[in-house]
Image (cartoon, rainbow, N blue to C red):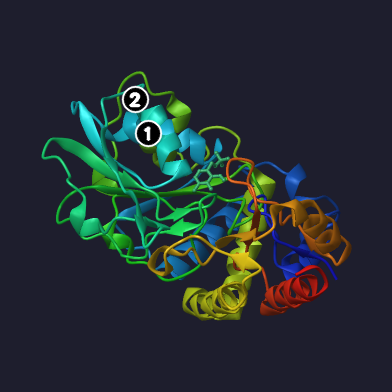
């Protein structure tokens, strides 16, 4: 059995893949596949509406929020957010907590002069993020943008935002649906689908209604939240197959017990993996305990000359995609919702065996 630790596109629940496989060429007895029918047909409209409803149920999204099914990945949102929300404002607060937050800042500089708040720090020599209470937000910012889970750095900000009436924008690409959140604390949430939702090509945006209609004129219509909302995310042809498959993942999540059940399972997986790392002198994770990601676990071998062998042997053992991001090296295990505890158990068994043989 193969366990895929890819950071994204990532592993999908096996039950979902089986169902998609069964339905691929004869969806709902139609003799055709779901990706070959019109996005405007009554059949696909039902798929789209069911997916939205299930997603709303899972995250308990209040009625005054729109859910948009978009193209362009999270990176498109790096531009869409400022162009939809800045209005007449000349600045927005941007928390620089890691690689992806930093990438969003670089994009934002095209449209405004962001107030950049460096949230990277160290605690006892370990990488960490500064607490939210220390962030010096500016009075004239249109919004505050941050990324609670840094997929590459393995850093997470576990606090939920509480900034009064400030508009909070969060990039949840690698943590959405992995634990309950209070949506009402956010103005905009966005997430590329390819980690914890479904196939690449789809991006979910949750936006509070009063933030619609503020877009700058130069904003391409396809990124305009108002236009997308007015057209039920079908201003142009949406990524229908990714939408359908994400809908199956939402149903699967509900069957599993929803986001609170995922929360428990994700904690158990993370505890097992970090515990194995911490109990060994052969492996190490250099993130402070309070900022450790439960989704993306980077770890280093004490002897980096064994890295290639580790990758080779882990692959042979059915443990795929453990190589760390090129920006940081080492190893990284992404353990999103679809990764079962058995997968993490297989990984930790392998790690201990590798240590016995090469330590
Ligand atoms: N934000 C986060 C937190 C990510 O992990 C990624 C991709 O890994 C991105 C943004 C960029 O996503 P996309 O490739 O969908 O544009």
As drawn, 359 above or below 234: below
Looking at the image, which is closer to me, 164 or 270?
270
Q: Which residue is mark 1?
A: 105
Cβ atoms at labels 1 and 2 below 8 Å apart: yes
The residue positioned 21% from the left and 37% from the top of the image is 142
Q: Quadrant of residue 295?
A: bottom right
Q: Which residue is mark 2?
A: 109
The N terminus, quarter of image: bottom right
Does residue 344 appear to the left or right of 294 in the view shown?
A: right
Residue sitting farthest toward the top: 218
Residue sitting farthest toward the right: 316
How far from the left and from the top, in percent, is residue 162?
21, 60
Q: Quadrant of residue 64?
A: bottom left
How far from the left and from the top, in percent, is residue 29?
82, 61
Does residue 67 appear to the left or right of 359 in the view shown?
A: left
Q: Quadrant of residue 126?
A: bottom left
The alpha-carbon separation of the residues under discs 1 and 2 comes to: 6 Å
Task: Classify 10 Å Cα crowding around label 1: few (below 14), some (14-19), many (20 and above).
Answer: many
Looking at the image, which is closer to me, 46 or 193?
193
The C terminus, quarter of image: bottom right
As drawn, 83 above or below 346: above
How far from the left and from the top, in percent, is residue 199?
67, 50
């Amino acid at each position: 059995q193969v366990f895929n630790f890819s950071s994204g596109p990532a592993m999908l629940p096996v039950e979902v893949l089986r169902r998609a496989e069964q339905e691929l060429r004869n969806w709902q007895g139609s003799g055709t596949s779901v990706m070959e029918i019109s996005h405007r047909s009554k059949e696909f409209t039902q798929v789209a509406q069911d997916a939205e409803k299930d997603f709303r149920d899972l995250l308990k999204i209040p009625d005054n929020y729109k859910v948009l099914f978009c193209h362009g990945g999270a990176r498109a949102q790096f531009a869409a957010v400022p162009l939809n929300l800045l209005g007449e404002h000349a600045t927005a607060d941007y928390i620089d907590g890691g690689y992806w937050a930093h990438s969003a800042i670089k994009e934002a500089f095209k449209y405004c002069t962001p107030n950049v708040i460096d949230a990277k720090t160290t605690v006892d020599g370990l990488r960490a993020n500064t607490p939210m209470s220390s962030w010096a937000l500016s009075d004239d910012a249109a919004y505050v943008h941050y990324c609670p889970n840094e997929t590459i750095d393995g850093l997470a900000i576990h606090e939920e935002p509480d900034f009064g009436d400030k508009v909070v924008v969060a990039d949840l690409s690698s943590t959405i649906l992995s634990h309950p959140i209070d949506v009402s604390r956010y103005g905009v949430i966005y997430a590329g689908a390819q980690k914890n939702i479904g196939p690449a090509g789809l991006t979910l945006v949750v936006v509070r209604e009063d933030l619609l209609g503020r877009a700058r004129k130069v904003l391409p219509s396809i990124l305009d939240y108002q236009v997308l909302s007015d057209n039920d995310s079908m201003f142009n042809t949406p990524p229908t197959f990714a939408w359908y498959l994400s809908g199956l993942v939402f149903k699967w999540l509900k069957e599993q017990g929803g986001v609170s059940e995922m929360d428990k399972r994700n904690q158990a997986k993370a505890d097992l993996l970090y515990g194995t790392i911490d109990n060994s002198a052969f492996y190490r994770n250099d993130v402070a305990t309070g900022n450790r990601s439960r989704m993306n676990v980077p770890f280093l071998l004490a002897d980096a000359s064994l890295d290639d062998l580790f990758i080779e042997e882990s692959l042979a053992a059915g443990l795929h995609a453990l190589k760390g991001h090129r920006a940081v090296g080492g190893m990284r295990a992404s353990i999103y919702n679809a990764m079962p505890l058995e997968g993490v158990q297989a990984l930790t068994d392998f790690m201990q065996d590798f240590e016995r043989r090469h330590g």
